[in-house]
Image (cartoon, rainbow, N blue to C red):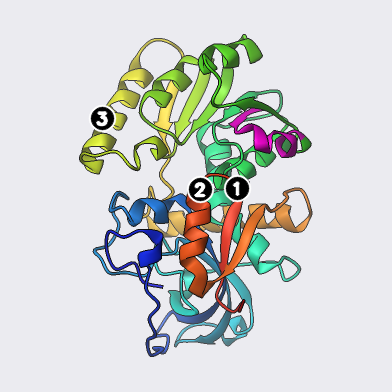
């Protein structure tokens, strides 16, 4: 599936290409599942930082099966199920990836379910444990608790022994309660006051993907020693102006809040931060994603597949994901026909 330019989801284009053999250090992977994430929503609008020039194949992550390997790669990898974070290029039936970037996926886990915890799972894990360092007894607020990242984050936080409050539309409240989350309607008038009433002492950590004014409100909900983790600017995806300038402003505001003598801190999470230190980046990614996949295989995490679509119906999949009516992640299955 090719994103040809600034188009609506219906403007996605199906194209065929000749498969190229994997080179040294590479593996050929049949794609069994790929996700529809917020990143693609930003990219089709030309508002995702660092996206490639049009046209390109979108797709932030995938689960697949290794079908062939290049020189220097262990042939035993052939037939293995693997996961990869790609940033772009996953919406395809077959791809070539660097073998060192592939993470094993437990055989007993369904590919579509595993897909829901790849970029979402490693993002949630690293924000929770490497950024906020949430432990037992902490009070945590997750905005968009029904979303792809949010639905994994609340489960990991509960597993860590934290009390979790999550904002979401009322249609998702019952399912969030089943996960041990205290839901709050994000549409309520005086939302900040409502959240202060829920946690009078403040939150140890707040996870906010909305951006703009929401960051300021979230910072005000922290208790002394608490951490605000920002990981997106969803509220600005349809806004005008420079994306780069928006990020500069955000980083500036977060920096000011962090240095003020108020005992609270704010940080912006970037999955690809530290990529230049390749070995360290890969080690952390393997460790964290493997742990998330283990928790999924053991039933500690519940995968929330909003709906599954064949690759050729990527437009419908993106429209559903952008409707903000689903709990969990919309998944593309390139080998599926419907």
Q: Quadrant of the N terminus?
A: bottom left
Q: Residue at x 44, y 88 (%)?
A: 71
| Pointer 1 local density, CA inside 10 Å: few below 14, some 14–19, many at least 20 | many
Q: Which residue is mark 1?
A: 326
Instruction: Note whether residue 222 is visible.
Output: no
Viewer-proximal residue among 326 and 119 = 326
**Above/below status of 94 relative to 315:** below
Q: Which residue is mark 2?
A: 323
Q: Quadrant of the C terminus?
A: bottom right
Which label sits in the foreground, 3 or 2?
Answer: 2
**Above/below status of 72 relative to 183:** below
Q: Which residues are magenta?
A: 165-177
**Above/below status of 73 relative to 325:** below
Viewer-proximal residue among 200 and 21 = 200
Q: Quadrant of residue 139?
A: top right
Viewer-proximal residue among 228 and 7 = 7
Query: How many angstroms separate mark 3 from mark 2 (CA)?
Result: 28 Å
Q: Is residue 173 magenta?
A: yes
């Amino acid at each position: 599936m090719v994103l040809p330019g600034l188009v609506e989801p219906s403007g996605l284009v199906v194209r065929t290409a000749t498969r190229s053999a994997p080179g040294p250090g590479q593996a050929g992977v049949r794609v069994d599942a790929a996700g529809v994430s917020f990143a693609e929503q930003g990219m089709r609008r030309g508002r995702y930082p660092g996206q490639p020039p049009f046209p390109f194949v979108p797709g932030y992550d995938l689960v697949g099966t290794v079908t062939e390997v290049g020189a220097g790669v262990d042939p035993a990898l052939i037939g293995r199920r693997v996961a990869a974070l790609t940033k772009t290029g996953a919406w395809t039936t077959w791809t070539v990836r660097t073998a060192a970037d592939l993470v094993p996926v437990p055989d007993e886990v369904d590919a579509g379910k595993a897909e829901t915890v790849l970029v979402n799972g490693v993002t949630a894990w690293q924000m929770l444990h490497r950024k906020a360092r949430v432990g037992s007894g902490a009070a945590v607020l997750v905005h968009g608790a029904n979303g792809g990242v949010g639905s994994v984050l609340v489960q990991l936080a509960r597993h860590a022994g934290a009390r979790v409050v999550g904002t979401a539309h009322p249609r998702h409240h019952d399912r969030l309660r089943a996960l041990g989350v205290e839901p709050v309607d994000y549409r309520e008038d005086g939302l900040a006051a409502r959240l202060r009433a829920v946690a009078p002492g403040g939150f140890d950590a707040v996870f906010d993907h909305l951006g703009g004014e929401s960051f300021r409100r979230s910072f005000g909900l922290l208790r002394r020693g608490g951490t605000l983790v920002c990981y997106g600017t969803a509220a600005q995806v349809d806004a005008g102006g420079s994306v780069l300038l928006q990020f500069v402003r955000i980083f500036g505001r977060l920096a000011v809040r962090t240095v003020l003598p108020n005992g609270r801190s704010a940080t912006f999470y970037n999955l690809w931060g530290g990529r230049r230190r390749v070995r360290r980046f890969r080690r952390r990614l393997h460790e964290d994603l493997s742990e998330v996949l283990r928790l999924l295989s053991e039933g500690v995490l519940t995968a929330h597949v909003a709906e599954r679509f064949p690759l050729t119906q990527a437009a419908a999949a993106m429209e559903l994901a952008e409707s903000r009516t689903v709990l969990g992640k919309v998944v593309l299955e390139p080998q599926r026909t419907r």
